[in-house]
Amino acid sequence: MTENPQARRSGCAIAFALDLIGDRWSLLIIRDIMLRGNKTYSDFLEAEEGIASNILNDRLKRLTSAGVLTKSRDPENRRSFVYQLTQKGRDLAPIIIEMIIWSGKHDTRDHARKGILNRILKDRAQFEAMLKKGLTADKLDSAQ
Amino acid sequence: MTENPQARRSGCAIAFALDLIGDRWSLLIIRDIMLRGNKTYSDFLEAEEGIASNILNDRLKRLTSAGVLTKSRDPENRRSFVYQLTQKGRDLAPIIIEMIIWSGKHDTRDHARKGILNRILKDRAQFEAMLKKGLTADKLDSAQ
């Protein structure tokens, strides 16, 4: 990763994870795929946080080269590409779930959405298993 | 947060968490306190990843103003300050733990350290409870 050129490599497990996902935008792209079933460049560009196209390009390249995403031709539109999570990417589900739980406890803003939190609190193990299998894309609405 | 001025606020729980901890250095500081018992500016500066002093200053200010850390006079050296996790900060323990588990599965480098991973795999619930109470600082060695 080139974003933190001053960062030295350590044997620490947390630093290893952060080398891949230690920035806001990478995890928002992973969220888009994992929880919303988004797949294409324009899907990601339309997320409400407003990712800039140069940042989106960079993060998609990184996540693909790190083995978290795959990029392939869209079978429904051969001129376009789709991005999907690998198993390594789907294994990030518990981190995403813990972030949702943490925010559910500490985000006191009125407009905080609780749809997915409620599903997690109802049956976390089942929800996590679904995400790890990549099954939620077509089963979740835009509640999150 | 000023690091992502282009980022729009959303009601998403993941985006809320990432506003606070969505960068590598913030989480490495939290790791230093939570797992290593580090407390002071110079402790953080000495971490093997080599944080730059301007970044360290910025992240300590942010994490303090966000209610994740407190800053107070060091009772043992009144000319110095110590940083400690609030309950909101200690509640990040499950996210840290899931990162360690994920890296344990996907970090195949020879020098990857497994000390803390083994403790988590042995009894995750107990380990998480210790971190949430802020009890590990003096019980962990530098295995991580």
Image (tube, coloured by chain):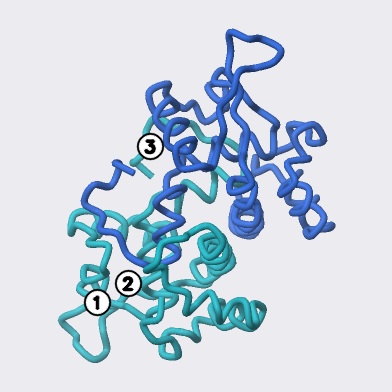
Chain colours: A blue, B cyan
Q: Nearer the viewer, residue A133 or B50?
A: A133
Percent position of residue B66, x then y: 43, 57
Estimate the spatial distance between the alpha carbons at disc 3 and disc 2, rounded to whole Å: 25 Å
Whichever of labels 3 and 2 marks the residue nearer the N terminus, that label is 3
Tag 1 secondary structure? strand
Kind of residue indicated by mark 2: Lys
Residue bearing mark 3:
B4
In the picture, which quadrant includes the C terminus of chain A? top right
Of the pair B78 and A50, the residue shown nearer to us: A50
Q: Is residue A30 above or below residue B111?
A: above
Q: Give the side of residue B123 with respect to residue A67, left or right.
A: right
Q: Is residue A14 above or below residue A84?
A: below
Disc 1 from disc 3: Cα separation? 28 Å
Secondary element at tag 3 = loop
User: In the image as oriented, which residue stretches furthest toward the front?
Assistant: B110
Near-viewer residue (A105 or B32): B32
- Do the residues at discs 3 and 2 belong to one chain? yes
In the rendered image, residues at marks 1 and 3 fall on the same chain: yes
Q: Image point 75% across, 34% down: which residue?
A: A137
Which of the two marks, 3 or 2, is nearer to us in this view?
Answer: 3
- Which quarter of the picture shows residue A28? top right
The residue wearing badge 2 is B71
- Name the spot of residue A64 as percent of width and height, x first: 49, 35
Pinpoint residue A56: horizontal percent, then vertical percent.
45, 27
* Residue placed under numbered mark 1 in the picture: B81
**Chain containing mark 2:** B
Q: Secondary structure at mark 2?
A: strand
Q: Tag 1: residue type?
A: Phe
Residue in the picture at 63% in, 52% down: A91
- Using the image as rendered, state which of residue A54 and residue B71 is in the foreground: A54
- Say if labels 2 and 1 share a chain: yes
